[in-house]
Amino acid sequence: MARSDLTAAIDIGSNTVRLLIASVGQGTIEPVCYFRKITRLAGGFAEDTGLAPAAMARTLTALLEIRAILLRYGIENPRAVGTEALRKACNGRDFVQEVSRTAGFHLEIIDGPTEARLSCLGVLSAIHPLPDKCLIFDIGGGSTEFILWQNGKIKFQASYPLGVVRLSESGQDPEKQDDILTRILATVEQDLQDGGFFAEILEPEVLLVGTAGTVTTLAAIDLELRQYDREKVNNHILSYDKLEQMLQVLAKLQLAEREKIPGMEEGRGDLIVPGLRVVLSLMPLFQKNSLVVSDAGLLEGIILDLNDRCMV
């Protein structure tokens, strides 16, 4: 039976497709159904041809699974958004049309500032206590976003072409990955310096908050979760020393061995080391010895935003 109080959000990312069906009461999200599948929409991406046919096919298959879930809950009009991979793809609009034809719902390609606002709204909904000031980073498949938040306002937001799928497909050579990281993070630092924000991020009271699949998987591994638990992952603290130990262990393992580790998300075995290298590069850049994990993000932000619109 359909429930009129339910809202559905779909995030079609560069690496993962996710669905959240939830109700909202007094600003609090009550999840009813959560679905995620790694489809690597950005896998095989090329500037001249855009999204690869196999990657689009994998993603459409996942969206058909989502469509079946939506029908079970009687939801006809979810808000589905696409991010970096679709923003950059020359055939992104063609994929939007194919989603409408095949899965039966509209896919909206959102811009960077919209993604930042919605992600920030979602990430902070899971952080307790709410900090006065924090730097949020979201490592995706095709890009990494940074959001500096203070007392209810976004002071800085930017997206950079630093994603785990891109790093992984650049080759497993650590030196090559480190070279890419060094180059892009130099740009991040310069942008923050130019905006006058870098010095204040270094202040000890500014909390570093990580979200998205790399960081939540690292939290699940640290917690040794054989079954993923969002409540345990939210607000989990990861130290630089612990993450460095993880890298030493994971880098030595074969792909099949990584996939067997408790907490490892299926299909993330080849992405976790590049993602971990990103995290371990960010923490010293911002002079942080630890970070706080938020499982919430863009999906929760969409749900809260839709609820606010309904209340107007």
Image (cartoon, rainbow, N blue to C red):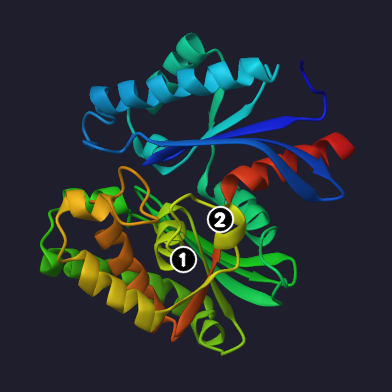
User: Callout 2: helix, strand or loop?
Assistant: loop
User: Which comes before the other along the chain, label 1 or label 2?
Assistant: 1
| Horizontal arrangement in the rendering, residue 200 relative to residue 258 (left or right) | right
Q: Is residue 31 above or below residue 247?
A: above
Residue at 29 percent across and 30 percent down: it is: 51
**Which picture quadrant has residue 162?**
bottom left
Residue under numbered circle 1: 223
Asked if residue 167 can be seen in this view, the reply is: no
Foreground pick, 140 / 312:
140
| Residue at the farthest top position | 101
Name the front one of labels 1 and 2: 1
Provide residue 125's location: percent of width, then percent of height: 70, 58
Foreground pick, 186 / 73:
73
Q: Which quadrant holds the N terminus?
A: top right
Q: Amino acid at mark 2?
A: Asp
Provide residue 131's location: percent of width, then percent of height: 69, 75
Provide residue 251's location: percent of width, then percent of height: 18, 66
Q: Amino acid at mark 1?
A: Leu
User: Callout 1: helix, strand or loop?
Assistant: helix
Residue under numbered circle 2: 295
Residue at 47 percent across and 23 percent down: it is: 63
Q: Is residue 42 above or below residue 113?
A: above
In this rendering, the count of numbered labels is: 2
**Which picture quadrant has residue 132?**
bottom right
| Tag 1 and tag 2, C-beta contact below 8 Å | no
Q: Is residue 168 above or below residue 158?
A: above
| Horizontal arrangement in the rendering, residue 195 relative to residue 213 (left or right) | right
Provide residue 98's location: percent of width, then percent of height: 42, 15
Asked if residue 175 can be seen in this view, the reply is: yes
Foreground pick, 29 / 120:
29
